[in-house]
Amino acid sequence: MNLKKDTFHSGLLIDLDGTILNKNDYISAKVIFDLKKLKDIIPISIVTGRGPQDVLKFSKLLNFYGPQYGENGSSAIDGQSGELIYKNLINYKSCEIILNEISFANFDYLVVSNGNTFVNPSENLNNISSIVVSSKREEDLDHFNSKIGILEGTLSQKSIDENGNNFLNYHNEFSGKDKSLKHFINFYNLNEEKTFVIGDGLNDMPMIKSCKNSIAMGNASNKIKKHARFITKPINEDGVSYALKKFIYPLI
């Protein structure tokens, strides 16, 4: 596939969890087949809250090339080599405040430092691009976030996975899936009218709102669906494959 700029007019950004990833990180054979077929026609990039290691794993599985976006847009890597394209770091003071508050709370959390993901780390880390706090109870995370308050240069976003786990994601203020969409369009010089995004979660909201051809999964909440141009079937009915056939192929 020729990935030179100006070659394409259309492109697709696609979320992982709840969009193509079922429980236990399973992607249906049909969705894999259909995405591999489409990626030979237009560029496709992952955009997820997960860290670079997972982004590379699934990018290689799907044979995606070019920039692939992790940490809700905080970082981008090459889809085959894993080479870092960019990353946005959380400032030191914000990291210190968040991690100090976590030390007094009974939450599991992960930190992405220098492109590597650490779960409940005990060591001091630097060059932090993401801090993600998890809980089964969304209200506990809301309380935690309210205690921290507004941090200069830092963005907080909520998300939920297919297993019902709630997450509070902290990133640099210049992160967000809408920023990934902008980078993706500029990288390939795409026509915005023919660019698509597919997602299901609250962290997908920025790109859903920013894309003219946004597609919400059938399993997405009404908060997401009301901002999407199209609504496809849920993940357990191969909603991505349905979206490709029903909405994307007719418009590219």
Image (cartoon, rainbow, N blue to C red):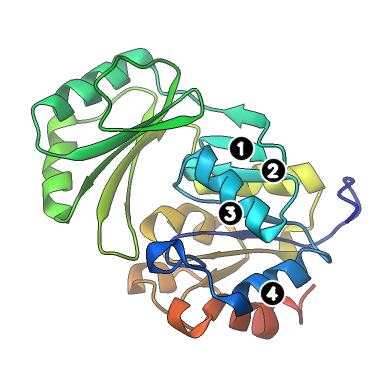
Q: Residues within 10 Å of mark 1 (few under 14, many from 20)?
A: many
If you read the primary sequence from the N terminus, does the residue marked by circle 3 or circle 4 appear first?
4
Q: Give the amino acid at mark 1.
A: Ala
Name the residue tied to disc 1: 76
Contact between marks 1 and 2 (CB within 8 A): the answer is yes
Amino acid bearing label 2: Pro
The residue at which mark 3 appears reads as: 58
Q: Earlier in the sequence, mark 3 or mark 1?
A: 3
Q: Name the N-terminal-most of marks 1 and 4.
A: 4
Viewer-proximal residue among 93 and 242:
242
Residue at 90%, 46% in the rendered image: 4
Hey, what amino acid is under mark 3? Phe
Local packing at callout 4 (Cα closer than 10 Å; few below 14, some 14-19, many 20+) is few
Q: Earlier in the sequence, mark 1 or mark 2?
A: 2
Question: Mark 1 and mark 2: span between their CA atoms?
Answer: 6 Å
Location of mark 2 (residue): 67
Cβ–Cβ below 8 Å for labels 3 and 4? no
In three-dimensional space, the C-alpha distance between marks 3 and 4, rounded to whole angstroms, equals 14 Å
Residue linked to disc 4: 33
Q: Which one is in front, 233 or 52?
A: 52
Percent of width and height locating residue 2: 91, 52
Q: Residue at x 50, y 50 (%)?
A: 48
2 or 3: tag closer to the N-terminus = 3
Mark closest to the chain's N terminus, 2 or 4 = 4
The residue carrying pointer 2 sits among few (fewer than 14), some (14 to 19) or many (20 or more) residues within 10 Å by Cα, namely many
Q: Which residue occupies the foreground of this view, 145 or 162?
A: 162
Mark 4: amino acid = Phe
